[in-house]
Amino acid sequence: AQTVTQSQPEMSVQEAETVTLSCTYDTSESNYYLFWYKQPPSRQMILVIRQEAYKQQNATENRFSVNFQKAAKSFSLKISDSQLGDTAMYFCAFMTNLKGGSEKLVFGKGTKLTVNP
Amino acid sequence: DAGITQSPRHKVTETGTPVTLRCHQTENHRYMYWYRQDPGHGLRLIHYSYGVKDTDKGEVSDGYSVSRSKTEDFLLTLESATSSQTSVYFCAISASTSSTDTQYFGPGTRLTVL
């Protein structure tokens, strides 16, 4: 069974600085997808970034980038130039196949990030 | 937001009563999902649907049933609510992009079972 581990329950960073959130996963699949979702106090789950395992190039979305190490099964999220609006819970997730072409997300327990002014 | 709404957004009910949560989408997505979120567990899959009348169980399906009689609606029913079902419930759809499917979530329903 696939598992996702986020080893940092809480982190804090000063505004404008850079922070990295860690995520490791376990799977026997060779081709898969990984995601980071953000959940601000509003509770809405917001997609931050996704990575296809067959792509060696790390995904980037504006201030957000990942460091994907397939052999180590590591998928960390780097937030550059942190902003107060980045304060949220961040979830790492692994996508696995289900019946009928559907797919399930397996989530880590999350990292609570606080950006301080 | 992928056109997903959930109703109700908040509900308080008593142990033993039936409860139905509704997920509605406006963009004709084939795949729909129900997750629950509890402290210390992240989100976990309850049930999913891969088409009208096609549903299956996820990892935490005990005490829940679902129905999907039309593409746009996916209903989650707690036949007899228990306190352990106090949680935040999220509906999601799967939307295809050029490279992969990505799941987008509704705003969530906070359910309290007293």
Image: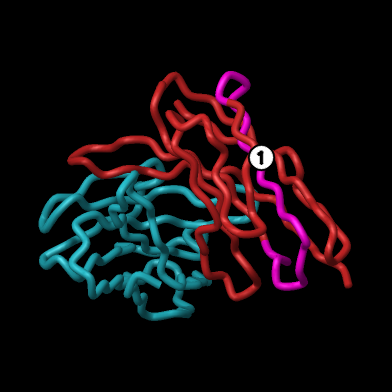
To which residue does mark 1 refer?
Answer: A76
Residue located 61% across and 59% down the image: A62
Give the drawing colour for chain B. cyan
Q: Which residues are magenta?
A: A70-88
Residue located 27% across and 73% down the image: B24
Q: Position of residue A38 (x, y in %)?
A: 59, 60
Q: Position of residue A56 (x, y in %)?
A: 51, 29
| Mark 1 belongs to chain | A
Q: Is residue A98 left or right of residue B71?
A: right
The stretch drawn in magenta includes residue A76:
yes
Give the drawing colour for chain A. red
Q: Position of residue B111 (x, y in %)?
A: 48, 71
Task: Say which amino acid is labelled 1.
Answer: Ser
Q: Quadrant of residue B80?
A: bottom left
Name the quarter where the C terminus of chain A is drawn. bottom right
* Tag 1 secondary structure: strand
Quick one: B109 or A14, which is closer to the camera?
A14
